[in-house]
Image: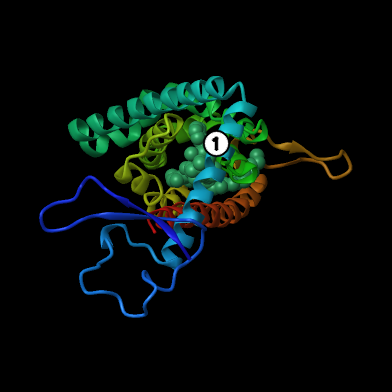
Amino acid sequence: MHAHIEVVQRSSQRQVDLKLLKQEGGWWDRLTLQPKKPLFLAPDFDRWIDESDAEMELKKKEEERISSISVESRVRKDPFLAVKRGYLFMYNLVQFLGFSWIFVNMSVRLFILGQDSFYDTFHSTADMMYFCQMMAVLEVLNPLLGLVRTGFIPALLQVSGRNMILFVVFGAVEEMQNKAVVFFVFYIWSWIEIFRYPFYMLGCMGSEWKLLTWLRYTLWIPLYPLGTIAEAVAVVQSLSVFDQTQMFALPLPAFVGGSLSFSYSLRLYLILMFLGLFINFRHLYKQRRRRYRSRKRKQQ
Ligand SMILES: CCCCCCCCCCCCC[C@@H](O)CC(=O)SCCNC(=O)CCNC(=O)[C@H](O)C(C)(C)COP(=O)(O)OP(=O)(O)OC[C@H]1O[C@@H](n2cnc3c(N)ncnc32)[C@H](O)[C@@H]1OP(=O)(O)O
């Protein structure tokens, strides 16, 4: 094979840099015609690439080209991307502020009043919790509208499960509202949400804080079972109230007579709750693995 030889300007007293321009593409077995390389000739190892380096480089360039095409086409295809991001950002911000308010309120009251604060949690925070949980219905709609990559079933279980506790077990039963269990349920819910929503907010801006991501994908491991246990305690405590008051009781046909206490529905709900815990725990575990696996791949 032949090459044009070009003398590069960067020559010094010690060396002369020669640039060989191949006349045809391809790999050379050696630099000169004679098999043994003259002693005065040395390749520039800073620029040296062998066949496998070149393949890697080509592959990398190809991947970069494909990802830039897919990003471009996604941006081009979705003219409402900015509106969607803006909506999600605002939604997450409102939820973050709501749960932060609840968390700070409960923490300050706990600090000042100690255990006495447990019994007044509902009256001091329920309005905000109602607001946040009503808004959370959007979390079931968002995946349906294709706005987020959340699983629809886990979101539905999460939102309907919490709303059942908040609106039915606590909201409708006055006897439950001054029980200590309200404190534990609300506090556990708030603990995860004050990290989850800012994590999403950063995501909407295309940014990430490693510590926040870690907290979002780790705190649920102790909090989810604890939260479910606290909710289960609340349900069990409310059973006798539903039996006594016959609130929401289902009237039975005349030939049977009487009515079916709502506590039976709640007993069934208790079973669903632990099934829901299993489904969502598995979902969150998979999300965690996906997040950290894809990050590891990016680092490699
Ligand atoms: C009346 C009949 C009732 C029948 C009910 C049956 C009963 C079921 C009961 C279930 C037990 C409930 C117990 C529970 O209440 C106890 C507690 O909550 S204790 C406190 C601890 N809890 C938690 O940790 C759960 C918190 N909640 C969640 O994590 C979510 O709600 C959940 C749906 C469970 C999982 O979230 P998701 O699937 O969204 O995972 P990711 O965060 O990884 O998100 C996936 C991707 O989507 C993007 N995303 C999602 N949401 C948003 C958003 N709002 N804004 C912007 N982006 C969002 C996210 O960034 C991810 O994107 P990417 O894939 O690009 O990383």
Residue found at the far left of this picture: 13
Tag 1 residue: 71
Residue 233's spot in the image, x, y percent? 47, 49
Q: Is residue 81 above or below residue 63?
A: above
What colour scheme has been applied to the protein in the rendered image?
rainbow
In the image, taking residue 110 as reference, residue 175 lies left or right, namely right
Q: Residue at x 53, y 39 (%)?
A: 68
Indicate the quadrant where residue 139 lies.
Answer: top right
Q: Is residue 169 visible?
A: no
Residue 228's spot in the image, x, y percent? 48, 50
Front-lying residue, 186 or 151: 151
In the image, taking residue 10 as reference, residue 270 lies left or right, namely right
Front-lying residue, 205 or 192: 205
Front-lying residue, 59 or 210: 59
Q: Residue at x 37, y 69 (%)?
A: 31
Q: Residue at x 38, y 33 (%)?
A: 198
Q: Amino acid at mark 1?
A: Val
Q: Is residue 204 above or below residue 277?
A: above
Residue found at the far bottom of this picture: 35
Mark 1 burial class by Cα count in 10 Å: few <14, some 14-19, many 20+: few
Q: Is mark 1 within 8 Å of ligand 1?
A: no
Q: Residue at x 45, y 30 (%)?
A: 204
Q: Is residue 253 visible?
A: yes
Secondary structure of residue under mark 1: helix
Front-lying residue, 230 or 275: 275
Residue 136's spot in the image, x, y percent? 54, 30
Q: Is residue 44 above or below residue 184?
A: below
Indicate the quadrant where residue 94 lies.
Answer: top left
Residue 272's spot in the image, x, y percent? 62, 52
